[in-house]
Amino acid sequence: MSSPNRVFVGRLDNLVVLGPDGESVGRVRDVVLTLQDPTSFPRAVGLVIQLLNRRRIFLPMLRVASFSGSAVTLVTGNVTVRSFKQQPTEIQVLGEMVDSLVQVRDPEIEELDGKQAVVTDVEIEQTRSRDWVVSRLAVRRRTGPFSRRGAVYLVEWEFIRGFSNASVLNNRQDATVLAHRYEDMRPADAASAILNLPQKRRLELATVLDDERLADIVQELPDDDQTDLLTALPLPRAADVLEAMDPDDAADVLGEMPDQEAERLLNLMNKQDAGTVRRLLTFSPDTAGGIMTPEPIILNAQTTVAEALAHVRNPELSPALSSLVYVVRPPTQTPTGKYLGVVHTQRLLREPPSTLIGDYVDTNLTALTPDASTEAVARYLATYNLVCGPVIDNTGHLLGAVSVDDLLDHLLPEDWREEEMAVREVNDGR
């Protein structure tokens, strides 16, 4: 950073925030600006801080004692815990201003003079009155989608034209830089961050994320936000994202949509994926059938222990679903052939790799029926000290498995994601 009273916002991203005693408060996620008059310098009014419990709060700039290359230090360790809510006159630098288009009127930069440029970073500077204002923008010339990116120039704010609250709201922006910020975030953290973006910016971000990444994030959003985002996408893209989601989560989203709209999306999905989701939609959402996943680890009795453990090690599976292997007669796609029982992963770890899992099947574990209530599921998991369990129909075919995370998702209040994105403790190693 060039000086204590001049800093680029991009360098603040993810910096640790320390109280005056050196205690960690959280991390910087963005800087909030206000722009009352397009001819005046935008003023930085505060920081968006993510606390250790994942909640995002607003911190006024007057609370900041200093910036350094490794941390932001506060004047006081007392901060508000009220969630950040962006006001209509405010702009988030990293979330909205970066990637926006501006015009440069700097005669000393001939390559950009009078041309459109893309904002890549924003420099803020502290004035004598202790206010922080935007002093310069880092920009590059706008090029086509397949062109090599040009050099980055530093342009004084007085030579920038075409930037205002309205331009941010109305002009379509590229979101590649924004998407890069979410690459290493856990889906729950990325979902929390997206909730703080305007609807327009959420959609721009969704267009540059791949289907798998977007599906992971959508699954962590509150129900209303899931529906709003998917219905704002073109129908074929929304169908692709639904295919990439866990079937039970996709069924939950479609169950919140009008029947006609849900049917259009199902018709655009892969037939096998759509068939799985349709089966889940036939069950009440407050039953074992409504919350189960149809894709646990399902194998036949002739599978070796080594092969079964290879399935258990699949990183795509949650720890809960990895705790049991379900043994059935062919076919192994749900609804399966006759359900034979389960093998506990701990048992597999104790047996020779070359032996068959059919030798270790637990046939005494009671199974759930698809119409069992969520309260009955909770009692079942507690009674048998399990984190997941089988769901079978009245003819003895395995339909899926209910895990404790599926259960919690439905027992918690509907707005639990929005009100408390901090259900899990922070343990990201940073």
Image: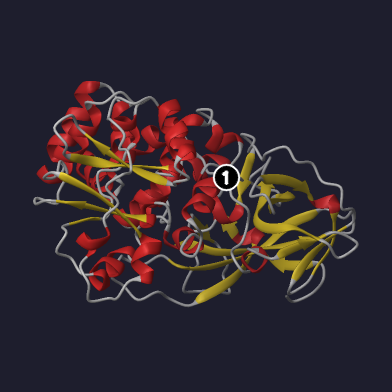
Q: Which residue is mark 1?
A: 164
Give the x, y percent position of residue 293. 30, 43
275 horizontally vs 18: left or right: left
Q: Which of the two residues, 183 or 293, is positioned nearer the viewer here? A: 293
Q: What residue type is disc 1 on?
A: Ser
Colour pattern: secondary structure
Give the x, y percent position of residue 401. 31, 43
Residue ID at (53%, 44%) = 197
Q: Is residue 214 above or below residue 143?
A: above
Q: Which of the two residues, 372 or 265, is positioned nearer the viewer here? A: 372
Residue ID at (42%, 27%) = 376
Please give the count of numbered marks on the rendered protein: 1
Which quadrant is the C terminus positioned in? bottom right
Give the x, y percent position of residue 125. 76, 62
Which type of secondary structure does the marked residue at label 1 adopt?
Answer: loop
Q: Which of the two residues, 72 or 155, is positioned nearer the viewer here? A: 72
